[in-house]
Image (cartoon, rainbow, N blue to C red):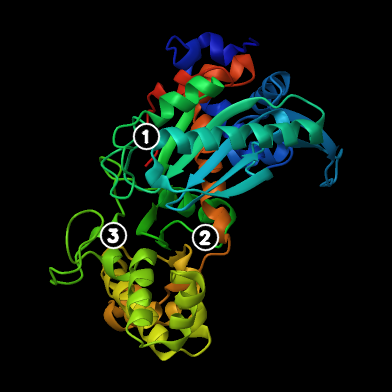
Amino acid sequence: MVEDDEVQASQTRGPGGLAPDYIDSLAVVLDLVRSGTARTRPELSRRSGLGRTVVTQRVNQLAERGLLEEGALGPSSGGRAPRELRFRAGAGVVLAAELGATSIVVGVTDLSGNVLAEREENTDIALGPEPVLDLVESLFEVLLDEVRATTGAEPSVWGVGIGLPGPVEFAKGRPSAPPIMPGWDGYPVRDRIAAKYSAPVWVDNEVNTMALGELRAGSAKGQRDILYIKMGTGIGAGLISGGHIHRGSQGCAGDIGHAAVADEATVVCRCGNTGCLEAYAGGAALARDGLAAAEEGRSEFLAAVLAENGAVTAADLSRAAQSGDRTSVELLTRAGRLVGNLLATLVSFYNPALVIIGGGVAGAGDLLLAAVRESVYRRSLPLATRELRLTRSTLSDRAGLVGAAFMVIDELFTPERLGYWVDAGSPAGSPDLVEVPLRAPLL
């Protein structure tokens, strides 16, 4: 390791035996270049507040470890043109997967979150952890082969991010009593994937990864306080507070799908309770109500779908509504109002600047979004909605995948974890990095 006077003068050692001040300054320089905030050494000095000598030392040390490289000459401000710096996003790859109720999306990204290869497959999360994760791992291998063939080099797996459609105990990387995931409760997802790839693994609720994806690469870029509402087979919310995911003390913040919206005891949710929002407005609920409308003759369109396919889905309901089917319009409008009424409470309570609606059901068109928006603006506090934007997801099906990758990237480059692996030049082969305590834990 290259040491300077600042490092040698410090008597307090932190992660990896490195001085905390040294780690912090190293992380600051790296983050400024990674984010594109600073591209030259003079810009780094201005943005970081670090002296020129320290900046030069940190840049040289990061370059020696393969994290930064020199680029083209930057614009001159009157003197010698500075050399631009680049983050070596291709130094490693991140494996990411978003597991939904009825499908999975997996991908390989570089260290800047750019998707290099991806694949989507239909499956049923209720099959249990073994067959579903077998499929995830086999798809990872296929995609790694694609990256290998494209780049001509062996990809180094720096970390793995997994999003699951249920509550997750983030600190342990295990699902906790997930309503739609029989057999998954307490399953060691993190341990299994870490053993397979010998890399650090982070597991979270898929809605959190979707929110993070929108924050880092979607319509929420640059925002600090947002709500991401996923309307799919189930319903959930991801909360971004102060630019960070808010998971709550046990990791289940945002589980709005099981908030009570009715007193009817006849409509039982998959969680076992009655009156849950998901039981009235989720994709499975819409399919159920659409089937009933078809069987009872209240919708000719859906009756024709049932006769042809033997089933009715939420997507069929959406197509019927777009074709002017009155019953389908009523069902989608009712679902939108129920979601909007609950969302109005959240908007008044949390006061976000932006609400993003995503998930498969959210693709039902403007009808659903209009019903959600009308309820939110009608029932929320005027001050809370004065500058509020409510929009559809721009990343669509890719939000969870991109977010799972950024979850890993954010965790790897915290100063504490960076201090453990920077001398090696890579966190590959260090699955225990997930256990490194943070001075200021990520929310």
Q: Amino acid at mark 1?
A: Pro
Q: Which residue is mark 3?
A: 256
Q: Nearer the viewer, residue 295 or 41?
A: 295
Which label sits in the foreground, 3 or 2?
Answer: 3
Split into 4 quadrants, where in the image is the C terminus?
A: top left
Residue drawn at x 63%, y 46% is 119
Residue drawn at x 46%, y 16% is 15
Task: Answer left or right for 331 relative to 122.
Answer: left
Q: Are marks 1 and 2 in contact (CB under 8 Å)?
A: no
Split into 4 quadrants, where in the image is the N terminus?
A: top right
Is 98 located above or below residue 130 in the figure? below
Real-space Cα separation, disc 3 to disc 2, in angstroms: 21 Å
Q: Position of residue 245 (x, y in %)?
A: 40, 47
Q: Which residue is mark 2?
A: 220
Kind of element beneath mark 2 = loop
Which label sits in the foreground, 1 or 3?
Answer: 3
Does residue 95 appear in this view?
A: yes
Q: Nearer the viewer, residue 277 or 384?
A: 277
Q: Which residue is mark 1?
A: 441
